[in-house]
Amino acid sequence: MPRAILTATFSDADRLLQAVRAVRQENFPIYDVYTPYPVHNMDNAMGIRRTRLPRVTLAFGALGLFFALLLQFGAAVFDWPLNVGGKPDNSTLAFIPISFELTILAGSLATVAALFLRARLYPGMRRNVIVGNTWNENFVLVLRRRDASFDICRARSLREQHGATSIEEGTAEL
């Protein structure tokens, strides 16, 4: 379903950051901000909270560690017990390298999969380019109009006050 969007292009990062803060104070829904390089404090200005991907990494890393220890212990004690110099069957020092590797493998693969799912980057996904020239030297603020209470004139004047070089209205499937 196409939705109305408003895009404003700025000449530098400082003006964009001031405009994002002002638009957020007025409770306009910010869809996204496009910049040619990372801008310090932009996440805070947009109100983006911290990611939960480290929790996924920790959970699946612990699961990988548990699986590695279970696999090695089962093989060394139950399936194939070997008496090597009178040492115990469940020598945990021998289990460390494989446990470490499976912890890292499970945590990293789960993190990448969760990132792709959360960002909706799965195969077959159509990406819409909202503003065609954002990858050069432009700083672009995109607002999404969700309902009739969205005041287009107020949003346009806010962005003009903060030095937008161009303001465009359009539609996109978001």
Image (tube, rainbow, N blue to C red):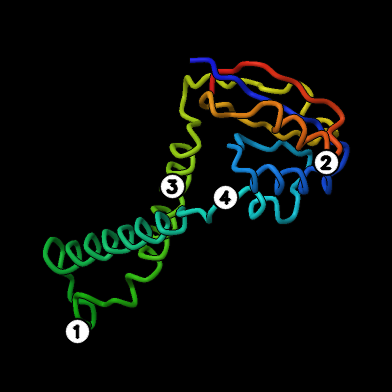
Q: Nearer the viewer, residue 140 or 67?
A: 140
Would you place residue 63 above or below residue 123 in this image? below
In the displayed structure image, the side of residue 21 where residue 89 appears, left or right: left
> Mark 1 or 3 closer to N-term?
1
Q: Position of residue 118 (x, y in %)?
A: 45, 39
Q: Residue 109 shows which numbered tag?
A: 3
In the displayed structure image, the side of residue 23 where residue 136 appears, left or right: right
What amino acid is labelled 1 in the image? Gly
Q: CA distance from mark 4 to mark 2?
A: 21 Å
Which residue matches tag 4?
48
> Mark 4 or 2 closer to N-term?
4
> Mark 1 or 2 closer to N-term?
1
Q: CA distance from mark 1 to mark 2?
A: 78 Å
Q: Are marks 4 and 1 in contact (CB under 8 Å)?
A: no
Label 2 residue SS: loop
Which residue matches tag 2?
162
Label 1 residue SS: loop
Q: CA distance from mark 4 to mark 1?
A: 58 Å
Badge 1 density bin: few <14, some 14–19, many ≥20, Cα 10 Å: few
Badge 3 density bin: few <14, some 14–19, many ≥20, Cα 10 Å: some
What amino acid is labelled 3 in the image? Leu
Q: Mark 1 against mark 2, which lies toward the viewer?
A: 2
Which residue matches tag 1?
86
Q: Nearer the viewer, residue 126 or 139?
A: 139
